[in-house]
Amino acid sequence: MRSTLYNPQQAKGVIDALWMQAKAQLMAGRRMVVTLKEETRRDGQNKKFHAICGDLEKSKFPWMGKPRTAAQWKVLLVSGHAVATKEEAELIPGLEGEFINIRESTALMTVRRGASLIEYSLSFCAMNRIPTIEDAEAFA
């Protein structure tokens, strides 16, 4: 059973249903695992963040002397956001002696963390006068 909890009343109903399912399994001697965690980022956040990365690529804004791809901007933004928000950043030698940044997964970000990443990315674009799809929508 997998559910998203929205409010206390709805959550109580889901938890009661979960208890009924779990009780039967436990009475039959089976062990069960229940996990409760904050909701991960939404599809709309994913699309918006990737659009920003695409906007950066299209802008040809140079980083370290050359334009970067959307995938490279994703790594740069996620890494910069982690440092800006006092999260861990770890640069380690890779398997072939190259240096890589071990960064957090955007797929595992909470909704709140995803919103913060988008805000950070839009701020970077604004500070560097890089137009984004959000700018185009604001003036449409």
Image (spheres, rainbow, N blue to C red):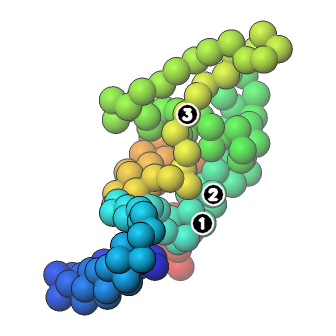
Q: Which residue is mark 3?
A: 103
Callout 2: SS? helix
Please state which amino acid type lies under the numbered disc 2: His
Q: Residue at x 33, y 63 (%)?
A: 36
Name the side, left or right, on which 6 lies relative to 42: left
Which of these two is toward me, 55 or 77?
Answer: 77
Q: Tell me the distance, in whole angstroms, between the alpha carbons under discs 1 and 2.
A: 5 Å
Where residue 74 sits: x, y (%)?
62, 44
Which of these two is toward me, 69 or 99?
Answer: 99
Q: Residue at x 66, y 28 (%)?
A: 63
Looking at the image, tell me whether mark 1 or mark 3 is earlier in sequence order: 1
Where residue 4 sits: x, y (%)?
37, 77
Labelled disc at residue 91: none
Badge 1: how crowded within 10 Å, few (<14), some, or many (20+)? Answer: few
Q: Is residue 86 visible?
A: yes
Q: Nearer the viewer, mark 3 or mark 2?
A: 3
Please state which amino acid type lies under the numbered disc 3: Arg
Q: Residue furthest left?
A: 8
Q: Which residue is mark 1?
A: 47
Q: Nearer the viewer, mark 1 or mark 3?
A: 3
Q: Tell me the distance, in whole angstroms, between the alpha carbons under discs 3 and 2.
A: 17 Å
Looking at the image, tell me whether mark 3 or mark 2 is earlier in sequence order: 2
Q: Is residue 92 above or below residue 27?
A: above
Q: Residue at x 38, y 52 (%)?
A: 113
Asked if the residues shown at circle 1 and circle 2 are in contact, with their CB atoms under 8 angstroms apart, the answer is: yes
Q: Which residue is mark 2?
A: 50
